Structures are given as structure tokens and as C-alpha cells.
Image (spheres, rainbow, N blue to C red):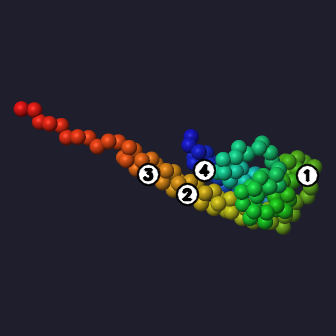
Amino acid sequence: MSEAEWISEWFKKAAEDLLAANHMFYNMQPRLLEIACYHCQQAVEKALKGFLIVKGIEPPKTHNLNKLCLMCMEYDQLFGEWQDTCRELTAYAASTRYPDCVEITDEDTYFAIEEADEIYKFCASLAKSLQSEEEVQEVQEVQEEEEEEEQVQPEEEPEEEQE
């Protein structure tokens, strides 16, 4: 699998988590609030990790969105806007999967879905623009190498005709 395909897989999985969260909140009765919030946390985790992979960083095996957000901030300070949200969503990584979890309201879930969607779009947009820049740079490098090879190769002399 190419690096571009690997990155695409991270964002595809994040989008699937968002789809699941939306379905559980908007289409199911009763609403599955805890599980929807869990999928929001997962979507953001995968989007942040996808961005790190674009930057050539192997993401750590963590569910701590704040830690991942801080790592992303090293490359783009705009991630700072998402720090508080990442801190809040991190709680949904584990607490929502067990019977003794905190009570989650419709408002909590709505907020989680909206914020997760915004962070996903932000990460995906940055990743796409960075991948495009890298592709352009790779094409330019190949073109430069081809030009250098053309300059280095001696011109062939025409062969004399034999009679």
C-alpha cells in the first residue's frame, strides 16, 4: 500500500466513525448517545493521526486527543483552536464503553458530533493540500532529474554508412 493510500485509509475510517455517530444520534430511537460520542472521539483520533502521517510522523498508540493535537500544533498552530475540544472528547475514548459512564446529554452529543466533524474537515483539508504540494514537488524533482540526465548524456554521433 502506498503512503497516499495509507493516509486515505485513516481519513476513510475517520469518516466512517462520523457517519456512525450521526446515525446513532439522528436516526436511532432511543438515541445511542454514549456510543455516538465514542465514535466522535475515534473520528478525531484517526483524523489527527492521519495528519501526522502526512507530516511523516508515526503517530503514537494513544487515545489522548490532547496529546495528538499538541503534536499537530508543532506543524500548524491552528490546531491550538481545537485543544479544549480534544481534551473534552478524549474522555469519550473509555468512559462511554462501560456501564458506569458519566451521563451524556443530547447537547453533549450534538456538540461532540459538530466539533468532530469540524476537526475532521480541518485535518482532511490540510492533509490534502500537503499531499498536493508533495506531489507537485515530486513531479518537479523527476523533471529536474530528467533534465540533468539529458544534459549529461553525450550526443550520439551518426553512424557511417557501409557500402
Q: Secondary structure at mark 4?
A: helix
- The numbered disc on residue 143 is 3
Q: Could you tell me the amino acid type at mark 2?
A: Ser
- The numbered disc on residue 8 is 4
Q: Nearer the viewer, residue 36 or 27?
A: 36
Which quadrant would residue 62 be assigned to in this image?
top right
Which quadrant would residue 43 be assigned to in this image?
bottom right
* Residue shown at 10% from the left, 32% from the top: 162
Mark 2–mark 3 distance (CA, rounded to whole Å): 17 Å
Residue that mark 2 sits on: 132
Closer to the eye: label 1 or 4: 4
Q: Nearer the viewer, residue 146 or 53?
A: 146
Report crowding for label 2: few under 14, some 14 to 19, many 20 or more residues within 10 A (C-alpha).
few
Report crowding for label 1: few under 14, some 14 to 19, many 20 or more residues within 10 A (C-alpha).
few
First reached walking from the N terminus: tag 2 or tag 1 = 1
Q: Secondary structure at mark 2?
A: helix
* Residue shown at 66% from the left, 51% from the top: 55
Drawn side of residue 117 relative to residue 98, left or right? left
Residue that mark 1 sits on: 101
Drawn side of residue 21 relative to residue 90, left or right? left
Instruction: Please tell me whether residue 160 is drawn above or below residue 18 in the rendered image.
Output: above
Note whether residue 76 is visible.
yes
Q: Could you tell me the amino acid type at mark 1?
A: Cys
Q: Secondary structure at mark 3?
A: helix
First reached walking from the N terminus: tag 3 or tag 1 = 1
Report crowding for label 4: few under 14, some 14 to 19, many 20 or more residues within 10 A (C-alpha).
some
Note whether residue 32 is visible.
no
Q: Residue 9: horizontal and vertical position, in percent?
A: 62, 48
Mark 1–mark 4 distance (CA, rounded to whole Å): 33 Å
Q: Could you tell me the amino acid type at mark 4?
A: Ser
